[in-house]
Image (cartoon, rainbow, N blue to C red):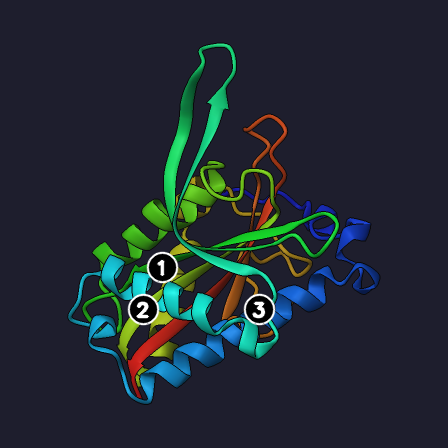
C-alpha cells in the first residue's frame, strides 16, 4: 500500500488562506452544487431521471448550475463537457486528453480558481463491484494521472445513486474499496494525519462525505491533489 505522508504540503500554500478568498469561494460553490441538486430533485426533470445515461444527467445538471449560479451569488461559470489536454510542445501533439463532466471556473481570484466535478452512476444499489471500479479507474484515476486538474490541487467526485437510503452504504462501499492495498497503490493515496488513506468525514470540504489525497510526483510539475467525494441521490 502507498503510504506517502505528505499531507502537510497539500493545501498549505498561502493561496488557501481566507485572506485571498479561495477556500471561502470553494465552500460557497460546493454548498450551491449540493443545494441545487436537492432543489432539482423536488420536481425532477425528465433528463435527470436515474434511468437515463450518465452523460444526459450530468449535462442537464451542469447547464442548470450555470443558469442559476449568479442568482445564488456565484460569479464564476460552470462549463459542461469541457475538453482538456496537455500539449506536447516537442511532438506538437495533444497528450493526456479527456473531457470533464462539469468544470467550475472563476477568474475573480488571484490565482484564478478552476476545479472539476467528475460524475459516476453507481448501480446496482447500493453499488456493484463494476461500478466501484469504474468510479476509481475511470474517475479518480483521471485526476491522479493529471488528465483532470493537472495544474490544480483539488477536484471532486460525485457518485449518483437511485435512492437516498443508498447514500450511506454507497459511501462505505467506496471507502472500503479505496482502503484495499491494490487500489490504494493504484490511486497513489497519501495517508492523512491519522495514518488513514480515507478521511471520513472530509476535513477540508464540509459538504463532502469523505476525502482522499493523491500523490502525483510521477508527473513532472504536477501538484498532489485532494479529492472531495459526494454521493447524490435521485429520489428521497
Who is closer to the viewer here, 95 or 74?
A: 74
Q: Residue at x 44, y 70 (%)?
A: 67
Secondary structure at badge 3 equals: helix
Residue 227, x across and y down, in percent: 53, 56
Residue at image location 68% in from the left, 50% down from the top: 7
Q: Position of residue 134 (x, y in %)?
A: 28, 51
Along the viewing direction, whichever of 112 and 170 lies nearer the viewer: 112
The residue where tag 1 is placed is: 119
Q: Earlier in the sequence, mark 3 or mark 1?
A: 3
Q: Is residue 102 above or below residue 216?
A: below
Q: Quadrant of residue 224?
A: top right
Please state the total of marks drawn on the protein image: 3
Tell me the quarter of the picture where residue 66 sits: bottom left
Query: CA–CA distance between discs 3 and 2?
Result: 19 Å
Asked if labels 1 and 2 touch by Cβ distance under 8 angstroms, the answer is: yes
Q: Which residue is mark 2?
A: 160
Q: Identify the residue position indicated by label 3 in the image.
A: 29
Query: Residue 51, percent across and down?
Result: 15, 71
Q: Earlier in the sequence, mark 3 or mark 2?
A: 3
Cα distance between the residues tagged 2 and 1: 7 Å
Amino acid at each position: 500500500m502507498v503510504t506517502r505522508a505528505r499531507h502537510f504540503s497539500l493545501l498549505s500554500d498561502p493561496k488557501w488562506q481566507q485572506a485571498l478568498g479561495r477556500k471561502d469561494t470553494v465552500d460557497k460553490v460546493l454548498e450551491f452544487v449540493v443545494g441545487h441538486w436537492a432543489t432539482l430533485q423536488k420536481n425532477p426533470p425528465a433528463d435527470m431521471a436515474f434511468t437515463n445515461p450518465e452523460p444526459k444527467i450530468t449535462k442537464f445538471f451542469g447547464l442548470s448550475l450555470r443558469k442559476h449560479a449568479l442568482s445564488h451569488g456565484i460569479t464564476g461559470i460552470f462549463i459542461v463537457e469541457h475538453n482538456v489536454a496537455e500539449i506536447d510542445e516537442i511532438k506538437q501533439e495533444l497528450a493526456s486528453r479527456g473531457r470533464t463532466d462539469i468544470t467550475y471556473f472563476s477568474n475573480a481570484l488571484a490565482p484564478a480558481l478552476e476545479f472539476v466535478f467528475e460524475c459516476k452512476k453507481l448501480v446496482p444499489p447500493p453499488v456493484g463491484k463494476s461500478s466501484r471500479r469504474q468510479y476509481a479507474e475511470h474517475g479518480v484515476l483521471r485526476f491522479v494521472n493529471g488528465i483532470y486538474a493537472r495544474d490544480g490541487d483539488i477536484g471532486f467526485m460525485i457518485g449518483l445513486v437511485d435512492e437516498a437510503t443508498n447514500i450511506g452504504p454507497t459511501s462505505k462501499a467506496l471507502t472500503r474499496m479505496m482502503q484495499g492495498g491494490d487500489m490504494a497503490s493504484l490511486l497513489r493515496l497519501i495517508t492523512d494525519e491519522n495514518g488513514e488513506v480515507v478521511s471520513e468525514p472530509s476535513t477540508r470540504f464540509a459538504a463532502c462525505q469523505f476525502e482522499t489525497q493523491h500523490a502525483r510526483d510521477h508527473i513532472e510539475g504536477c501538484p498532489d491533489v485532494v479529492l472531495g467525494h459526494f454521493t447524490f441521490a435521485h429520489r428521497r
